[in-house]
Amino acid sequence: MSTTFTPSAPVRNADVAKGLAGRRKLMDAAVRWFCIAATILALAFLASIIVTLLWRGLEAMDFTIFTSEFRPTTYGDATAQKGGLLHAITGSLLMVSLATLIGTPIGLLVGTYLSEYARGSQLGNAVRFVSDVLLSAPSILIGLFIYQLVVLPMGGFSGIAGVISLAIIVIPVVVRTTEDMLSLIPNTLREAVVGLGAPKWKMIILVCYKAALAGIVTGVLLAIARIAGETAPLLLTSFGNNVVSGDMTRAMASLPVAIYQQANSGYPDLIAIAWSGALIVTLGVLLINIAARALLRNRG
Amino acid sequence: MGTTAPPPPAATVRGSSGRLGDTIFEWMCRGAGLLVLLLLGGIIITLFIGGLPALRQFGIPFVWSTAWNPVEGREQFGAGIAIVGTVVASVLAIIMAVPLAFGVAFFLTELAPEWLKRPVGTAIELLAAVPSIIFGMWGLFVIVPIIQGYIQLGWIGEAMAELPGIGFLFASNSFTGTSLFAAALVLAIMILPFIAATMRDVFDQVPPVFKESAYGLGATRWEVVRNVVLPYTRTSVVGGIMLGLGRALGETMAVTFVIGNANRIATSIFDPTTTIASVVAMEFPESLTGSLQQSSLLLLGFLLFVISFVVLAISRYLLRSKLKA
């Protein structure tokens, strides 16, 4: 412990006491102002991101963004038509929904395993640890993994490869929230259900899942928000495409990859479209996040 | 995990349908758990096998070699530049992010009035939700010009470059603003909310009695945090910092936008350089299937996996031991 408040010898000299108290108060005030400044700075970063997105994103934002596929730059060609992001939006919607449909049940089962079957077991601890590591693991490595596992054998980039890599990212997010939510359920509830003679699987599906529903849905929403903005794994798996396509065996466009490619195209009009895409993605991700938090807060 | 494990419900005496259902469901859950383990094993093995040709060609010196030449016929690859770039950018980011994250966590737990805690806390969490690529575009559009115009070429940068002994760290021939420092700054902003959230959660776990005792002795708020809260939460705070470091090491898109992607070691914080993740993102989609370049990139990925796995494992260990205590 520090010496500052050790009541050793009583301080006789009033000036020294005053000086010491003054220094302590000054230090306290300095730290307090630093913390307030740090918080304001962090909020300013978020505000700056949102303002930048609105400012640059609204420049090219119109109906064409949602109704037109990619078109080459109109730069230096007055007759050319402005393109849009329809191909990327449909590709993202398709891949994100499929990845969520695949990843959610697996994550749910893993979370159930950790909470209902493997509490304290060695295997359970290993699964929990690996899932937590995957939660923060670099997503580009999942892209490399699926490239080797799916893209190479299939002979090219494909929507399927993109879906699988996103599904792998969904799993640990759902595992974490599912386990957390299931472990909040009091054991007396489980005992009551089993005491009535219900088999364990019915107890879990009919009672535990129901009790933890809001939390589980929150986890799924957070997972959707997470994969909706993922770029790196898609760059190595589904890559990109300039037209609306539902063919999962071919390369497929997605909003983040389209944004990345157009932002680096060097043409001002394509960069403006990239900013519109960035605005769409960010607003979507932030709104899903806010909805997820509101859902968790309002649960019964 | 404070609650005790539920007693395994005895097998039901009713018909075998319940028991069969139980067996099937339990094995589905266990199978899904095993799948997660398989995923991790699969990632490690796949990346290693993919990197084998490069490892055979260049041997262990690949890890520190600074060669990077994809020109056909004289291909030469090494991980040195990318590893140094990754580690230096992440460590710089941690140095910048930790004080800010502490400030935010301290503000949220001790200073903020009740009505302000939730909106500010939510806003910080939203900062964590912003996709990486958005940080990249924003960094390139907002942060990079600030670094270029006001820091590197402003009076701060010029004064720093004049410092005896360490001046060279701030002097650069590159004036674009896309640099190691830009990457570190953007990374710092990205990991700040993760570290702040961990710190806030563990600060909240400190028993109020401890803090109240210190306040009762006349300690100021700073003294309470320094002498009571931080010693009590030290392990978890370090765990949270390691979590941030793990995230920073593997961050891809944001870094790719602002680091300049130059295959050389940065001698100044304003030099462009590269990281493992960004060199993979930049070169992998264009590399030829089965080429030595592709294999080298996979080997780089394997090295990144090893580095971030170790950091994340330490982080989990530190955070886990706290929750059990």
Image: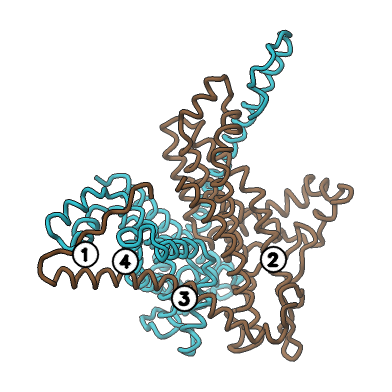
Q: Are marks 4 and 2 on the same chain?
A: no
Identify the image quadrant of residue B118. top left
Whole-Å distance between the Cαs marked 1 and 2? 54 Å
- The reply to whether discs 1 and 4 touch (Cβ–Cβ < 8 Å) is no
Q: Chain of mark 3?
A: A
Is disc 3 in the same subunit as disc 2?
A: no
Question: Which chain gets the brown colouring?
Answer: B
- Chain letter of mark 4 equals A
Separation (CA) of disc 4 from disc 3: 40 Å
Disc 3 crowd, CA 10 A, few/some/many (<14, 14-19, 20+): many
Residue to which mark 4 is pinned: A109
**What's the CA distance linking mark 4 and mark 2?**
43 Å
Check the residue under mark 1 and report the chain it is in.
A
Q: In front here: B251 or B309?
A: B309
Marks 1, 2 in one chain: no
Mark 3 and mark 2: span between their CA atoms?
27 Å
Q: Secondary structure at mark 1?
A: helix
Q: State which mark lies toward you, 3 or 1.
A: 1
* Res. B228 visible in picture: yes
How far apart in space, not on screen, are marks 3 and 1 (Cα)?
49 Å
Do the numbered discs 4 and 2 sit on residues whose CB atoms are within 8 Å? no
Residue A79 locus on image (x, y percent)? 50, 76
Q: Which residue is mark 2?
A: B260
Instruction: Indicate the position of residue B266 as horizontal and vertical percent values.
Output: 77, 63
Query: Which of marks 1 and 3 precedes in the sequence?
Result: 3
Mark carried by residue A70 = 3
